[in-house]
Amino acid sequence: MALKILKVPIVINAVVVAFDICSSSDIIEELTLKGDMKRFQQFLTAIKRHLMEKQKTITFNTYKFTGDGWILLFPENTDGKVLLKFLKDLCVFFRTEFRSQILRYLDTPPGIRGLTFGLEKGPLGAMLMYGKKEYVGRALNIACRLQSAVKDKGGSPAYKALVSNAVFNDYFEPAKNFRIFKVKRTLRNIRGGMAFRCRKIELLRSSSTT
């Protein structure tokens, strides 16, 4: 019997955006203790709907839900200004919805609340895993590591993005009206722990009182 060959694109070139919710474990714990976990699920659904609405004006793939965030894949020809506006708009939406749907129901609000982001670009290899298209590639690993490393240094990580120099140079270098810093991070299992040079972008001013 001949083997059935499943055809999927071998390689795509993409800008990977990984983001998640600050202090999600603390939020989930309190809502679970109150028997109100459904409230967090409804909040996640609101974010999903926002992403779906944005797909009407900017092309991207909501590749993977991670439990308290998403990994998004943008085409490599995405306009940098449009992408940066997308990230800021997502932060504004999150802040508004978090206040109305979550914050006022918490007895012990977390000190850090917002979103953190990691961005990298590069080729991703496609494969089928249990009948579902999945991707592997350095850009995925780096974006997720950068997202996790936003909180590694002082100051609130909320509404901030760590982006690789490649992403910054190709998409964000002419960015205005954003605070941008040259930083170094040690990324787990990346280049033997050597310092990874990148940019930190403050997408939205954060405050523990908002």
Image (cartoon, helix red, strand yellow):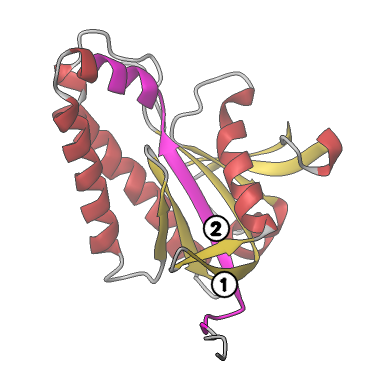
Q: Residues within 10 Å of mark 2 (few under 14, many from 20)?
A: many
Q: Secondary structure at mark 1?
A: loop
Instruction: Specify the farthest residue to the bottom.
Output: 2
According to the picture, the residue beneath numbered tag 2 turns out to be 16
Query: What secondary structure is found at the residue carrying circle 2?
Result: strand
Marks 1 and 2 close (CB-CB < 8 Å): no
Evaluate whether residue 104 shows in this view: yes
Q: How many numbered markers are drawn? A: 2
Q: Is residue 200 visible?
A: no
In this rendering, would 206 be left or right of 37? right
Q: In the rendered view of the protein, which quadrant contains the N terminus?
A: bottom right
Residue 36 on image: x %, y %:
14, 22
Against 105, residue 21 (above or below) is below
Mark 1 closeness class: few <14, some 14–19, many ≥20 residues within 10 Å: some
In the rendered structure, which amino acid carries the disc numbered 1?
Answer: Glu
Q: Is residue 71 positioned above or below 26 on the image?
A: below
Compared with residue 19, is residue 31 higher up or lower down, i.e. above or below?
above
Q: Position of residue 103 (x, y in %)?
A: 21, 22
| Residue shown at the point (37%, 39%) measured from the top left | 67
Question: Residue 171, percent across and down?
Answer: 59, 63
Q: Residue at x 62, y 41 (%)?
A: 146
Real-space Cα separation, disc 1 to disc 2, in angstroms: 9 Å
Q: Quadrant of residue 188?
A: top right
The three-letter code of the residue at mark 2 reads: Val
Residue placed most toward the observer, 21 or 178: 21
The residue to which callout 1 is attached is: 76
Q: Is residue 26 magenta?
A: yes
Q: Measured from the top left, where is residue 110 in percent x and y?
A: 34, 15
Q: Which residues are magenta?
A: 6-30
